[in-house]
Every structure is written in structure tokens, then in C-alpha cells.
Amino acid sequence: MRLKTIAFLGWFLCSAIFTGSVLAGESENKALFAGLCASCHGETGDGNGPVAETMMLKPRDFALAAFKFDTDANWESGTDIDLAAVIKQGPAVFGGSQIMPAFGHLEDDQIAGLIEFIRSRQRNGSADEID
Ligand code: HEC
């Protein structure tokens, strides 16, 4: 009986901590995106940030998950490797827009967080709101 209680408490604590850190990660990713990317990509990633209005080539709507660059030439664009390379080096290196800067100063886990955010836009299938 006692053992069961302890086991339950242990399980409860672990899952609470795990859920907490996942949630913290999500809001961190969102904040990073809002700070660095939303001026062009829009807060929801729909490509309608305030700066985008002045652009000839709009940043795309991440909800559509249609990516252009195949940075490692494996015949597939928009893989994690491709997105990380575009974010780190900027699209211009891969023949794309000069407008988006390179974010080479970001840590790998920050890049991974941004990719996670971009992917979360796809999963929702709509960029209407950000939770
Ligand atoms: C100054 C405006 C601007 C900012 C800031 C900006 N982007 Fe972009 N981004 C663009 C434009 C324009 C494109 C389209 C590039 C093209 O098609 O040549 C783009 C394209 C992309 C793509 C699509 C790559 C593909 O293969 O289709 C990703 C992913 C991306 N940006 C992520 C980010 C992230 C993450 C940030 C913030 C760290 C960011 N961008 C900041 C303008 C911007």
C-alpha cells in the first residue's frame, strides 16, 4: 500500500515536471519567434507581418507547409535540416530572398525551438490564431 502511494506520487511529480517543461518550451519558442521573425512572418507565421506589406516576395504562410529550399540536395525541401540551414544562413545563400537575414548567432536549441514553432503552425492547419 505504502509502496503504491510512493510510486503514484513519484509518477505524479514526474509528469507534472515534464508537462511544465514542455509548456515552458512552447512559450519560449513563441517568444523567440515573436521577437526575431514576426515582423516579417507575422506573429502566427502566416507571412503577414508588418514588414511583409512592403515586400515583393512575401514570406510564405507556414500553415501551408510549402517550403522552397532543399539545402542539402536530398530532393526534399523543408526538412529540419533545410529549415535550420535557411534560418542560420539566410535564404540568399540558397538563391532566395536577400531580405531575410541570417540568424547564425542562435544556439542550436533555439533554432530547434523555432522549427518546432513553425511545425506547430502546420499541424494546426490554420494560422488564424496563436494560443
Ligand atoms: C526581414 C524579413 C524576415 C525576417 C526578419 C525573417 N524572415 Fe524568414 N523569410 C523571409 C522571406 C522574404 C522569405 C522567403 C524567402 C524566399 O522565398 O526566397 C522567408 C522564408 C523563410 C522560411 C522558408 C524557407 C523555405 O524553404 O521555404 C523559413 C523557414 C523562415 N523564413 C524562417 C524564419 C525564421 C525562423 C525567422 C526568425 C528567426 C525569420 N524567418 C525571419 C523574410 C524574413
Image (cartoon, rainbow, N blue to C red):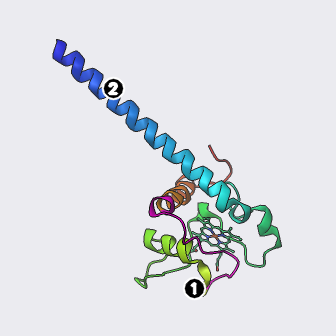
**Residue 110 belongs to the span the image colors magenta:** yes
Q: In the picture provided, is 95 more to the left or to the right than 50?
A: left
Residue nearest the viewer, comparing 131 with 90 = 90
Query: Residue 89: which quarter of the image?
Result: bottom right
| Residue found at the very far front of the displayed protein | 105
- Of the image marks 1 and 2, the number of the one nearer the N terminus: 2
Quadrant where ligand 1 appears: bottom right
Instruction: Mark 1 and mark 2 in contact? Answer it, CB < 8 Å.
Output: no
Q: Position of residue 52 (x, y in %)?
A: 77, 68
Circle number at residue 12: 2
What span is colored magenta in the figure?
A: 96-111
Image point 44% across, 78% down: which residue? 76
Amino acid beneath label 2: Phe
**Location of residue 72 with respect to 22 vertically, above or below:** below
Count all numbered tags in the image, as a single digit.
2
Magenta stretch secondary structure, dominant? loop
Image point 60% across, 75% down: which residue? 102
